[in-house]
Structures are given as structure tokens and as C-alpha cells.
Amino acid sequence: MNVCIVTSKHVSYNPRVVKEADALSSAGHDVTVVTVCNNCAQAALDEGIMATRSWRLLTVNYRKQGFLETFRWLWFGIRQRLFSDYFTGITLGFGLAERGQGREYPELRRLACSLKADLYIAHHAECLGAAYAAARKHDARFAFDAEDFHSGMFAAPITEYVPAEFDLRKLLEESDHRPKGAEQRRIEYLERKYLPHCDHMTAASDGIGEAYSLKYDLPCPTTILNVFPLEKLPKHDKVANQAQDSIHHSPFTIHSLQGSIHHSPFTIHKLYWYSQVIGPGRGLEEAVQALALLVTPCELHLRGMPLPGFVEQLTALAVSLGVGERLIIHPPCPPDDLIAEAARYDVGLALENSVELNRLICVTNKIFTYMNAGLAIIATDTPGQRGIMAQAPDAGLSCRMNDVESLAMAVNRLLESPELLTSFRKESRRAAEERFNWRVESDTLVRLVGTNHKSFNAKTPRHRDAKNV
């Protein structure tokens, strides 16, 4: 079967697409990923990934490199601004929402339509139109993989605690009655327009799937957790063989943002957090504040692409609290190196919060990265993360959302008990080996893709024209 995956991010910043393409290619499908190329550094990482892949990568290029691509970059930006700021204020129909939401939508659609496939899988809401157009042109199947609840990435009740038995339907109804920004209206329009036409739909968590099902009256999508292939760890990082007295760190060297170097004569434990972007609303401010409350000093390592100005603000906060030398920033790494990089640390932080509805119900790949790497886990108790931690209760601790003291208490409990830290690391790795790994989830994906679905939603025939929805 020929499969075309349509996404709007570099594959080096989209490990879920890479895993999906790998799994389907290994199962014998002919896979092509259609995406964008708008950053030279990320393009270099893409090349490293593709050097070992059997599937193809086709891109819409506008990297501000050379006259032609620079012109395209400028034109794409001006064009999207016209649609998003002006035309979609009049109507979202006639393809205006697609162009207002997707900077390179016409080119991505044209590229996807140029490929004849049996199945087109959209990733991200802004790619729905391009994948659907290609599927309709070639009378093919159409699917959507929801890594997030995209229309829920804007507003949610600001609360410090959400009970385990919370009412998702009520939260959705409440959010529908709140004022909505232009981007949220565009995404909701695109989801409502295209999702009923899916032959199948997958989601990265049960909560995301349930939210889409309730919001748009769809059958519940199949959950494909955002886990990773199980990797063999270096011998010195294998937690299964770690004894209490084997937890060891060399004297460390910290490189501050100003380039000065500080040496410490003692050993220290290391907390780890990573994402594509280091920015606000991710629990990082609370993590820095918690550093100042720890009985046992440790380092906080953050990996990702810093938003302009945010790392400077975070560093200033750390300095003001007297823990500036314990905050270390690392650049992004390729998806293939995520586990090996994480294995260098002791405790993985999964600090989701209640800033938006999506954050409450998602299960990011952080937890699964930490499990694979054999890290003890500290996770905020969002409803989405509670479900995973309940299945691996001995892999780590939970803390309350938006609560600095609760986070500090959890870290203190781990660092003050080497036996507990060792036990949690061992059980975290065991959870990855037995349940939370890509071999398990990819089997579900391959079976689903191989099934000859007639229609995801029987109420909406697949070949119905979506232009006037």
C-alpha cells in the first residue's frame, strides 16, 4: 500500500511522524512524508534522520536561503497575514481558513496531490485540507493522527487541581461559551469540516480521542501512545543492574549563558526536561523556583529551542533565587538521540499544567522518553498523566499542578532516598520494556492501517465534497 503522511513540521522536530513512517515502512508499505523545510538547522537534522530511512521525504522549501527561497518565505508570510488578518474575518469558507492557518498550505496541498497514494494521513489541523484534497483527487482513504487536541490548545479553566473523575463534556461546553480568538475559530472550523470524512482517526491519548469524539460527535479514535522504540542503554546507564551505591556523578562543569565556567567539588543529581521549545506555560518557572526549596542541591537541565527572551527571563529568575549556576540549557537533539541523551540524567520532569484544555488531557512523549531511558519520573497530576502513572505507580511521583512546594517536596523525597531513586529508575525502565514502547503501539497502528475501512463516520460518506461543510 502507498501511504502519504502530510505534516507541517520538520521531521527532526516531529518524532511521532518518524516513528509512524518507520513502522509502516517496516510493515511493507511504500511511505512518503510530505512536509515543509523552513529552517536550515532543522534541515541539517532532517538529513541525518533520512540517511538511515527507507521511506521518502518531500518538502516545500522556504529557508531564507538564496533569492528564490527568501522570496518564497516573504511571500508566504504576507499571503498568510492577508488571509488570517483580513479575509477570514469575512468568512472561513472557500479555502480561506486553510490559507489563514497554513503558511504554505497551497504548496503543501499541491505537493500532496501530486503523489498518488492509497492512504493520506494528516498530522496537525492545518494539514487536514491538503491531505483531504489529495485523498479526494485519488479516491483514496483519508486519516488524521491527533497528537494534540488542537482546538483545545487555547483556553481552559485556570485551576490548581482537576479531580480524577472530571467531566470532560462539561469542560468542552464551558470552553465553547468563552470568547474565541481568530486562530481557535479557524482550527475548529477545519476540524469540523474535515474530521467527519476520516476513514480512521488516531489520538496520542485516551483524553484527546474522547475530546474529539465528544466535540464533533465522532466514533472514538484509536489511541496510539506517543512512546518510543525500546533502546538498549549503555552499560553504565542500565538501571536494572544499578545498586544503591552505584548512583554516581563526576564533578560537574556548568557553562552559563554568559560563557563563564564554574567547577564544583561535589557530586550532584540532575533533573531533566525537554521539548521542541523552551517557553512559558510549561512548568519551567515552577521548576526553577523549586530548585531554591530543595534540601539536596541538584541541577536542572532543559533541552529545546528557546523562545526569544524566555531563557533570559528564566535565568534571571534563577539568579535572583540564588540557583543560577544550577540551570543548564541544551540545544535540541535529533529524535534518534532523545533516549540516549535522557539517559544521562536521574529524574525526568513532566510538568504539564492547566493553562489550556489540551494540556489537561494529553500525554506527552516526555514520560515515555524518561521510562525508556530509565529515569525516575516526577509528573504533574493532570488527568492525562494520572492514567499513565497509575499504570506504572512505582516509576515515580506525582505533584500538584502549578504548585512549587508540591514539586519541591517530590524532588526532595527522591533525592533524600537513594534507595527510592534507584527503585523508581528500575521500575521506570521495566514499564518501558513491558508496556510503554513502540513495538506495542506500532502493532496497533499497522493493523489499523491494514484494515480496509469503509468509512470512519458512517453518517458522512467518504466522497462527499467538503467545500461547503
Image (cartoon, rainbow, N blue to C red):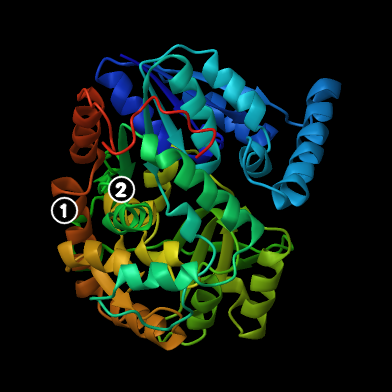
Residue 203, horizontal then vertical, whole percent: 33, 47
289 vs 132, nearest the viewer: 132
- Which residue shows up at 56% across the image and 62% down it? 253
For disc 1, the marked residue is 430
Q: Report whether 323 appears left or right of 455.
A: right
Q: Nearer the viewer, residue 335 or 137?
A: 137
The CA span between labels 1 and 2 is: 36 Å
Three-letter amino acid code at the position of disc 2: Leu
Depth check, mark 1 against mark 2: the one in front is 2
Q: Total marks drawn?
A: 2
**Is 68 situated above or below 87?**
above
Q: Position of residue 264 (x, y in %)?
A: 54, 71
- Residue in view at x 82 percent, y 21 percent: 68
Q: Residue at x 50, y 72 (%)?
A: 177
- 331 or 403, which lies in front? 403
The residue to which callout 2 is attached is 218
User: Percent x, y for residue 244?
Assistant: 20, 68
Is 126 positioned to the left or the right of 362 in the image? Answer: right
